[in-house]
Amino acid sequence: MSKFKKINLSEQEMPEKWYNIQADMPNKVLPPLHPLTKQPVGPDDLAPLFPMELIKQEVSREKWIEIPERVQDIYKIWRPSPLIRATNFEKMLDAPVKIYYKNESVSPPGSHKPNTAVPQAYYNFREGVKKLTTETGAGQWGSALSFACGFFGIELQVFMVKVSFNQKPYRKSMMNTWGANVVASPSNLTESGRKILALDPDSPGSLGIAISEAIEAAVMDPGTKYSLGSVLNHVLLHQTIIGLEAEKQFAKTDDYPDVVIGCFGGGSNFSGISFPFIKENLTQGKNIRIVAVEPESCPKLTRGVFKYDFGDTVGLTPLIPMYTLGHNFMPPKIHAGGLRYHGAGPIVSQLLKDGLIEATAVHQNECFEAGVKFARSEGIIPAPETTHAIAQVIREANRARLEGKQKTILFNLSGHGLVDLASYDQYFSNELEDYSVTEDQIRQSVAGLETLSVE
């Protein structure tokens, strides 16, 4: 049946549970630590930021967690998302590969992010929360949470990384349309933002800075909670609906992936597509290669260190075990704003440390070249973040051609690029830079983490 391009599930076949990979991992994730006591944080430490149900999911070792019926009802606006065989892309690449992509761009905000935005808004609503704060890099997370909060009447304050705020004005328009208030970060609304601006009035901002501002704004108001779009365990849990659907869809074909690929910022879309297939490796003895693709300009998985570090720039979060470039690292101003984050989620970091996944890095010109090839063959203009995964697909196809081996590749098309077209304009005008981080820059950025070593 693999000759059919589009493989869909009926609405009734949408998964009703999320998969918690912590139940199957051979080495458990190290706990987050209180920055002062260096002791594991407990529920009371997280309660000012998150509703209790999300805190429970954060630490749960239960393998399957029920998706609430109300969340399923909202998911059904766009889920199940289609699994599509990219036959035209295969012809363009002329290699012995079958290429499939899970099309997460079909959600109303145009990305995978609502998969966790909706349950996070739901659990906050159920606990009586009236307002949330959050950060956003490229604006995909901010727009998804704006969309989700609208279903539950929750007010939302978004701190959007300044370089993306200026590069992607229509992301702000989307958030405003769904009722959110959006400011460029660093801002003058918080002490964290004012501190950064005092040091660098022209700071382009970063996800680490925006997280600091969003957390500060939340803890200063007892009626407000904080919501995060990547990194944390409960966020990755919610995203596993992507890979779980893909498994069911592949069961309707005579194919199965040899390689699963996702772009990588903090870990949400990569984990969503890959964790259910890692489950097959861990529990069924399969040997699927799992590849995370990050920017050369922000190479925490490929060149970072595995340490305890803050999840934000100012140091308001617990200490998290992660591959990191250091919380003070300032990523270059690439267009894949969702990937400009200094650290990796703790689950993904442990999986990489244990050799259960691979990581590679790509320059942005190679990514946009790949994105254009995909658009010209398959019709979908991918988000700058997604082009990293597509660039790796092309590398895998070239490798298969050289080896003369048939290979089936699955990647997550995590979002469309229809509000990122200014970045494509820059690519066509040869104005995009390929940034490389020096070893000295990384060494200086992680130097202060030595006392927090977890090696």
Image: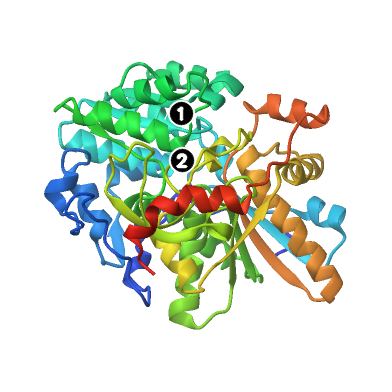
Residue 372: name its quadrant.
Answer: top right
Amino acid on which the number 1 mark rests in the picture: Ser
Residue designated by label 2: 113
Residue sitting at x 12%, y 48%: 44
- Is residue 449 left or right of 370 when viewed as pictured? left
Quadrant in which the C terminus appears: bottom left
Q: Residues within 10 Å of mark 2 (few under 14, many from 20)?
A: many
Q: Nearer the viewer, residue 166 or 317?
A: 317
Q: Nearer the viewer, residue 36 or 264?
A: 36
Which residue extends farthest bottom? 285
Give the Cα separation between the discs numbered 2 and 1: 9 Å
Residue designated by label 1: 143
Is residue 76 visible in the rendered structure shown here? Answer: no
Residue 291 in the image: x percent, y percent? 60, 63
Is disc 2 in contact with disc 1, using a CB cutoff of under 8 Å? Answer: yes
Quadrant in which the N terminus appears: bottom right
At mark 2, the secondary structure is loop
Q: Which of the marked residues, 2 or 1, is nearer the chain's N terminus?
A: 2
Say if 218 sits above or below 373 in the image. above
Residue 180: name its quadrant.
Answer: top left
Residue sitting at x 19%, y 54%: 41
